[in-house]
Image (cartoon, helix red, strand yellow):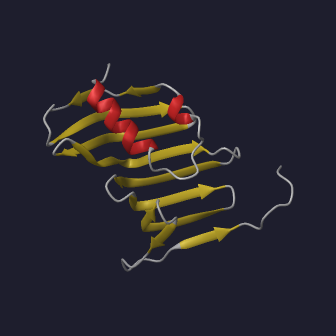
Amino acid sequence: MRPNKSLTILVSALLLSGIAGAKSTDRQQPMDITADNMDSLLTDTSESSIAGNVVISQGTLKIEADKAVVTRVKGDFTKVTLLGSSARLQQTNDNGDTMRASAREIVYFLGNDQIHLNGGVVIDQARGSMRGESIRYDIQSGRLTGGNDGTRLQMRILPKNTEKN
């Protein structure tokens, strides 16, 4: 399957423009998208769907989901939603550290650089991990918020190593 140009731009904007700490060269790499099917409407206000074993990769970025939905309003990409029994995102930063995140729903709001992870959220990074049912990430400020939904968060913060293993 070869996605249309608008959809590729949309997915690229969604996945790469806001992820803090991502490997800086990833955006210069080709993006590969595979899925069982796609449904896209080429109008200024629409939703496009990529579904069935969705795999998106670009450089060190790898995303796996049952479905990806991209929303456009008045010609601007406004939201990308990854859905699945466990939508997964993995990326390596310039230091060589890998971040892995999974949730049943990962929503990236492009207009305000917010990422919302909902349902069985697990985030693992070199210096620690976070688990919960609802975690919000503000890309601009770097602020993580979670809980406030009647469930508890679990965090593990590892000590800073003076030498990289």
The answer to whether 157 is drawn above or below residue 114 in the figure is below
Residue 74 in percent (x, y) is at 15, 45
Front residue of 105/139: it is 139
- The residue lying at 27 percent from left, 30 percent from top is 6
| Vertical order, 86 against 159 (above or below) | above
- The quarter of the picture where residue 107 lies is bottom left
- Quadrant position of the N terminus in the picture: top left
From this viewpoint, which residue is outermost toward the right? 163
Q: Residue at x 38, y 41 (%)?
A: 13
Side of 31 relative to 128 (left or right):
left
Vertical placement of 117 versus 39: above or below?
below
Q: How many marks?
A: 0
Q: Position of residue 86 (x, y in %)?
A: 42, 49
- Seen in the picture, residue 45 relative to 34 is either above or below; the reply is below
State the residue in front, 159 or 153: 159
Rendered residue at 56%/43% (across/down) = 91
**x, y (%) of residue 80?**
31, 47
Left or right of 94 on screen, residue 107? left
Q: Which residue shows up at 68% across the image and 69% down it?
A: 157
What x and y, as percent, mark residue 133?
41, 67
